[in-house]
Image (cartoon, grey):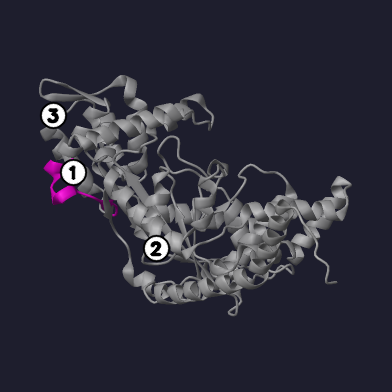
Amino acid sequence: MRETIELPLWLFVLILLFAAVTFASHFLFPSVRWFFRRRLERAVARLNQKLERPIEPFKLARRYDMIQRLIYDPEVARAVAAHAAAEGIPDNVAFEQARRYAREIVPSFSAFAYFSFAIRLARWLSNTIYRVRLGYQDEEALRRLDPNATLVFVMNHRSNMDYVLVTYLAARRSALSYAVGEWARVWPLSRLIRAMGAYFIRRKSRNDLYRRVLAAYMRLAAQGGATQAMFPEGGLSLDGALAEPRLGLLKYIVEAGAPLGGQRRATDPDQRDVVFVPVALNYDWVLEDKILTSAARAGERRFRARIGVVMAKILRQLWLWMTGRYHRFGYAAVNFGRPLSLQDFAASRAESQSQSLSQDLGQELMSRIGEAVPVLPVPMAAWLFLRHGSMSSAALEHRMRALGEQMANASVHHPRASLAYAGEAALRILLKRGMVSRQGGLYLPVTEKRDLLAFYANSIAHLVPDSVLVAEET
């Protein structure tokens, strides 16, 4: 026991390294994690005092704990057993598949990353690219919302800037969890998006086990009060018009309010209500408009945007900014529509089956989004050019005024409260984009760019009264 043992230096260093790692993992790391966890909890408590909707514990739970809770959910367990029997594989193999799906779906929300980085970046990016306007919102209705209800913002999908704009404009209300598709699973973007609280979904997956895991996560999120944001249309609009709702995520939320027995928990007073807040967005210049209209012409949702072309455009805008010639891409506006309670909606349709309720809910939400869509100068001018052809600037201003007066129930945005300036702003962008040309004192729509004009006109076409269309046709 007292004899001296000689060791090679490399082995001695290796033993010291293992000892240091063991000491750190058993004594140092837990203390450091506890220290920072306490500081984070105090910071979140201060932050919650400033937010209209405090961050729920569900969102702050550790990702590992949430994955464990998800894969041991009774409905997921039944789905694992059914999947194993259907595929003829051992239960433990099916269980590992469910675990992999859970790890793919569950986010790792960071309050620091969201409120210290994401909100500031969203504010800077939004105001750098656009003149951002927050239009109509029923503040009184929003204040009357049940503070214990789960809030779900439902939006029309015009551009990938939708995520950025709504994150910025909803910053004082709460932290939003977005459902994002496969495009966002690229490293290192995926880690950043997870930290923002987004959860990944496979939009075209037909795997029943995956759908059951996703449905279980949506149920836990709804019951946990996590504020979410989603696009009922399921993807970007290719023609600029509102699309029919896709019922996947909506159906999961509706199912979260109904037990297996069939009687709806959505009408149970002890069940947490889900309140949908319609959000309508519109732009004078959608950054991806050419990509979207090209996909519409091809008849398939494949977006051919080469990274080299994207980087060249970014560098060009940076050069314009450095040389003092940069101009923002027109106006971007957001309106908040009339909130809708799932409990009230389900109670009014107590005789409906779950699928019918989901369909009715989707149609009602898209209707409320549609009525709140902001009317901006470029969409307005595009609609008029498609209807009337060539016009002078004075005629455009006159017709924009007449159209705005006839769209009495719509939220018409006039920059600087001046129709003359609105017409000038619209013409400046349409000329720059090559959608109209100037011949003498007249402006004419360019035939080759009619699909782009229609893309912007379609965003407000549903708001134009039928009486206007009939009057013009006669």
Q: Earlier in the sequence, mark 2 or mark 1?
A: 2
Q: Is residue 411 magenta?
A: yes
Which residue is tagged 3?
392
Which residue is tagged 2?
338
- The segment highlighted magenta reads 409-422
Q: Earlier in the sequence, mark 3 or mark 1?
A: 3
Closer to the eye: label 3 or 1: 3
SS at mark 3 in the image? loop
Residue drawn at point x = 56 percent, y = 59 percent: 108
In the image, residue 176 above or below residue 400: below
**From where the camera sits, is residue 473 visible?**
no
Find out whether the residues at labels 2 and 1 contact each other: C-beta distance under 8 Å. Answer: no
Q: Residues within 10 Å of mark 3 (few under 14, many from 20)?
A: some
Q: Position of residue 49 (x, y in %)?
A: 39, 77
6 or 431, which lies in front? 6
Number of labelled discs? 3
In the image, residue 79 above or below residue 283: below
Q: Quadrant of residue 379?
A: top left
Residue drawn at point x = 34 percent, y = 41 percent: 461
Q: Position of residue 33 (x, y in %)?
A: 57, 70
**From where the camera sits, is residue 276 visible?**
yes
Residue at the limit of the structure toward the bottom, as seen here: 270
Closer to the eye: label 2 or 1: 2
SS at mark 1 in the image? helix
Find out whether the residues at labels 2 and 3 contact each other: C-beta distance under 8 Å. Answer: no
Residue 402: numbered disc: 1
Residue 118: numbered disc: none
Left or right: where does residue 398 sit relative to residue 474? left
Dot 3 amino acid type: Ser
